[in-house]
Amino acid sequence: MNFQLSSSETRISILIVGVILFFYLYYYTAHSVFFVRFAERRYKNQSQKELYRFFMQKLTGFVFLGLLPGILYYFFVDHSMDKYGFSLSLLRSNISTILLLSGIIGSILFLTQKVKPERNSLQIKWKEWTISMFVFNALGWTLYLVGYEFLFRGIFLNACFNDFGFWPAIAINVVIYSAIHMVNGKDQAIGALVFGTIACYFTLTKGTLLIPVFMHISLSVFSDYFSIRLNPNLRFVKSETIDIPSR
């Protein structure tokens, strides 16, 4: 048996290990007791503590899943970022696709919440939300998901596509993407198979990472919005009843 790896196999093997390693670093850092203890010492209000932990988890995700892998990939693998399609021209040419997919995602989440009104996807466990607090929540998700998609549908997917082709690249990406969602339960793992396949398909066929980024942001923001709107235990309030963290 020949156990010697080709250059492409070596590159992808290292990349897979790197993706999993960075995800583990993010996950265990973001959910470490350090942030909990820091919040306990710095903030007295429980709402402030939850807001701090949420934002620091999302910031940690952006750093470990986007910023650090991007820096390493740029300096040691490929200096070109053109392949990821971050441009206004590609945004304009794909805006109809982005709006269509976001609309479909929003509709599915609306119907799901109507069927199961007790469902709550929010990671900040407040019962009352102001618009400003929801915007802050959406900004946290946006920061995190830009980094997340850059690693999975950017660096990882494009490297697999260059070495193995269209469908093998999607298969490799989706399997790993779904596997890391298993910690969140069966439903999310299965949902990740469907979402991941669609996100990978449009990334490669349209040549831009903007589509999966907006898809994922729509998924998280719509899910949280409908949780507040349709869950009988949650609601939006007009007055500023929740304090912003302050020293």
Image (tube, grey):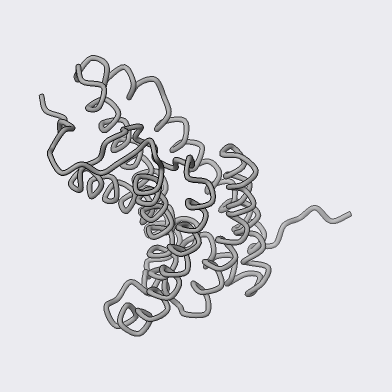
* 60 left or right, relative to 3: left
Q: Residue at x 57, y 44 (%)?
A: 181
Q: Quadrant of the N terminus?
A: bottom right
Q: Quadrant of the C terminus?
A: top left
Quadrant in the rendering for residue 184 = top right
Quadrant in the rendering for residue 4 = bottom right
Q: Residue at x 26, y 33 (%)?
A: 51
Q: Residue at x 58, y 47 (%)?
A: 188
**Residue 172 percent coordinates (x, y):** 65, 59
Please say if 71 is above or below 124: below
Q: Residue furthest left?
A: 247
Please say if 96 is above or below 7: below
Q: Residue at x 32, y 35 (%)?
A: 54
Please say if 3 is above or below 56: below
The number of numbered badges drawn on the structure is 0
* 96 left or right, relative to 236: right
* 209 left or right, relative to 246: right
**Residue 211 percent coordinates (x, y):** 42, 70
